[in-house]
Amino acid sequence: MSFVPGQPVTAVVERVEIQKLRQGENLILGFSIGGGIDQDPGQNPFSEDKSDKGIYVTRISPKGPADLAGLKIGDKIMQVNGWDMTMVTHDQARKKLTKKREDVVRLLVTRKSLEEAVKQSKGCYHKP
Amino acid sequence: MDTESTHSGYSYHSSRSGRSNRHGDRSRERHKASSSKDSSRSERSVVINPPDTPSQDSPVHNGEPLPGEPTPAAEQGDEAQDDNWGETTTAVTGTSELSVSQEEVVGLGKGIQDRTQSFRRYLPLAVGSCVGLLVLATPLVFLLLPAVMWPDRLQVCGAACEGLFLSISFKLLILLVAVWALFLRPSRACLPRVCVYRAFLITLTLLLTMSYWLFYGVRILDAQDEDYHGIVQFAVSLVDSQLFVHYLAVVLLELRQLQPCYSVCVIRSTDGETRHYNIGQLSIQRAALSILEYYYRDFPLHNPALLSASKHRAAKHLAGLKVYNVDAPGNAAGAQPSNGNQSRAMVTAAGKRKDSAHNELYYEEADYERRVRKRRARLVVAVEEAFTHVRRMKKEDERATPSDIMDVREAALAIFPSMARALQKYLRTTRRQHCHSMESIQKHLAFCLVNNMSPKAFLEAYLVPGPTLQYGPERWMADQWTLVSEASVTSGIKQGTEFLLKCLDFSLAITVKTIPYIRLTEEYIDPKSHKFLLLLQSETSV
């Protein structure tokens, strides 16, 4: 999931659509993010490669919109509504997620289990 | 056999060093025997004597008490039944007779020895002053002889000569002071051999002076040279060369040893006190001298009373084992370990006893610690209380009754009795009561009162054993040191040199290592390059 400079980043992603919940004046999504290119990647407990500066989901409030949509803790967010999340600062990521005009966010997230599931399914495929 | 070897060892020792310290040795032996009797009486453990032996105390007639001592006593009794009995007793009486006769011989030779000792002490001074006089007189003689022998034919020289006269006189004055400072001052120690560098320098000086005399005699006296200016310049050049030789002397004798190149490890044989020092390039005897000066400053006083405990333990290890000599005829009874298996039998038997020995040691030491701490607490309280009774006189006290006003000696004597008992008991427990006499304690108390010291400052001298110089001159034993070395004592110390400095009761083992060659490299850091980043891991909930 980490990137090699000069090479395109490839990952198996899952599409997650979260409906924002109105709580008073705010629209909340029900999860917390960590990471960013201005943060210290070594302290990220969820990344496999400790130099990965991507945005990770660090906490999911139970029964919140993100939980209901199927977001899991430790997921790396690759895109938010089409905006790239692999090379953004922490604040930029927060801004993209909390736009007041948008009711719904469509995320592309990746996790290790997705890669493995694909690998397993590939492995069962026999060439004729 | 053990008995014979220890006895012969003693007689060898006494014949080897026929010095007058035999007197001190004997009195020390008696003291040691009595102190060992005391400590064995105070031992809590019970030692069962085999029926043959008279006692387990260290025998009086041995010079150096060895850990295996009671065994010879035991073996003496055992071998009493041997055919070697006659030989053994002869050795015993032979030794005691020998030691008595040795005393007489020492007494006879003492007169001669004193004279040779003082001769040795004053020889360098005599040689130094002779050479110094020669060195000082020679230029003056060079100048005076032409003026005396052929005054009418001498060419008068003007201001140049006067300048040279002035320079000669000042240089001779400096040379006089310098020679006195380097060679004629009383030496602070008596070394076994002549210092090689001093001998070399004296030879060089004499050689220089002789060659100048030779040239003077041939060129000037024989030819009756008339050029006085040339003669004066000749004398000036002699004084200059002598000053340069003196400069060489300063470098060789004083400066060479200042730069440290060797690290020396000094270990005391009795209690293992270790110190490390850095010294420069010296001969072995000079190095031994400076190490001894450090010894008197740094090492705590050697206390033989503290060492008796381990000797008793060692004695108990061996005393419980009966070792029979199979080779002696008529001794069929008893265990049969032959000489080859003797050590193995001893070790296995010792192993069985080891379980109780370390237990005993542990409880003994814990008990001793407790007792010392208890006595110390009582002592500290007694001293603090005593110090509260006396106070320095202030201005307003001048109106007090004259009988209350005392000088420091009387004040010390007045408060001393209240702490004397506690102090005496503490010193007895830590076995240092022989180091401090009543007068010395009172003197120290007076000193502390005069200098406004706290009770803790007064007590510090008694709680911790200080360096040897702190105690009276009878403890110094400064004239009893012997240097034992395999290499010649005038050779320089090198990496791996080892030698031994023996005193009466103990010895100092000395090892020499070079200080490592240090390679220091430099790294330049631009002060503007100190920049920092703030690394966060913030978590935002969205």
Image: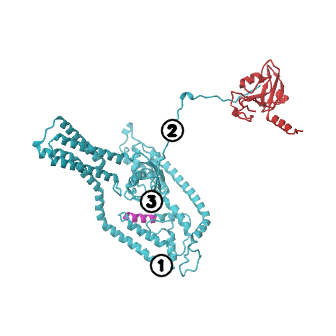
Chain colours: A red, B cyan
In this view of the protein, which residue sits in the foreground, B92 or B443? Answer: B92
**Secondary structure beneath label 3:** loop
**Secondary structure beneath label 2:** loop
Q: Residue B85 has which mark? A: 1
Residue furthest to the top in view is: A101
Sort mark 2 into few (<14), some (14-19) or many (20+) by Cα contacts within 10 Å: few
Q: Residue B474 has which mark? A: none
Instruction: Residue under label 2, please give it.
Output: B521
State the extent of the magenta-drawn residues as a range: B22-34
Sort mark 1 into few (<14), some (14-19) or many (20+) by Cα contacts within 10 Å: some
- Tell me if I can see residue A47 in this picture: yes
Residue furthest to the left in view is: B152
Above or below residue B200? Residue A36 is: above
Residue furthest to the right in view is: A128
| Marks 3 and 2, how far apart at CA | 45 Å
Instruction: Residue at 43%, 68% (x, y): give it.
Output: B10
In this view of the protein, which residue sits in the foreground, B143 or B45? Answer: B143
Q: Amino acid at mark 2?
A: Thr
- In reply to whether residue B7 is colored magenta, the answer given is no
Q: Give coordinates of residue B181: x percent, y percent.
A: 29, 46
Q: Residue B506 has which mark? A: 3
Task: Specify the subunit that label 2 lies on.
Answer: B
Task: Specify the subunit that label 1 lies on.
Answer: B
Magenta segment, principal secondary structure?
A: helix
| Marks 1 and 2, how far apart at CA | 74 Å
In this view of the protein, which residue sits in the foreground, B4 or B138? Answer: B138
Q: Give coordinates of residue B72: x percent, y percent.
A: 50, 71
In this view of the protein, which residue sits in the foreground, B485 or B101? Answer: B485
Q: Are circles 1 and 2 on residues that touch, CB within 8 Å? A: no
